[in-house]
Image (cartoon, helix red, strand yellow):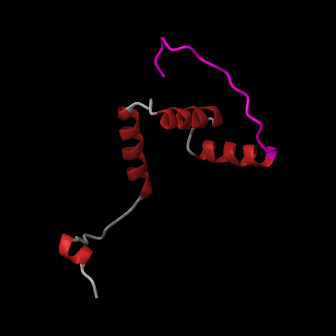
Amino acid sequence: MPLDSAIMNITLPVDEKTAERARKVAQAMGKSLNQVVCEYLEHLAGTADAGETGEELRRLSLQSGGDSRGLRFDREALHERS
């Protein structure tokens, strides 16, 4: 969030159980629920910093532990019809 922008506090009615589950998810992400909601609103409004988004994508890809086991796909194989 730019330092020169005005900050607005908002109040949202949220079911207690939903809020608690959301807090746990945010905590698992290493963030506060407030951070997650603010980031979502920035994304929704189209003001999220592209650099931050790229860094988040990189972090998540490294964290995922995905492994293609060397498999490669080509365009023809992906569009092959049986």
* Residue at 63% in and 32% down: 34
Which residue, as the protein is rendered here, is positioned at the far top? 4
Give the quadrant of residue 73. bottom left
Question: Residue 27's spot in the image, x, y percent?
Answer: 62, 42
Residue 5 visible in rendering: yes
Number of numbered tags placed on the structure image? 0
Comparing 46 with 2, the one in front is 46
Q: Main secondary structure of the magenta part?
A: loop
Q: Quadrant of the C terminus?
A: bottom left
Question: Residue 31's spot in the image, x, y percent?
Answer: 58, 37
* Residue at 54% in and 38% down: 40
In the shown orientation, is residue 53 left or right of residue 77?
Answer: right
Which residue, as the protein is rendered here, is positioned at the far right? 16
Is residue 4 within the magenta segment?
yes
- Magenta region: 1-16
In the shown orientation, is residue 66 left or right of residue 78?
Answer: right
Question: Residue 15's spot in the image, x, y percent?
Answer: 79, 45
Comparing 57 with 4, the one in front is 4
Residue 74 visible in rendering: no
Is residue 36 within the magenta segment?
no
In the shown orientation, is residue 18 left or right of residue 46?
Answer: right
* Residue at 43% in and 56% down: 64
Above or below 76: residue 32: above
Question: Residue 30's spot in the image, x, y percent?
Answer: 56, 40
Above or below 42: residue 71: below
In the shown orientation, is residue 35 left or right of residue 61?
Answer: right
Give the quadrant of residue 32. top right
* Residue at 48% in and 36% down: 43
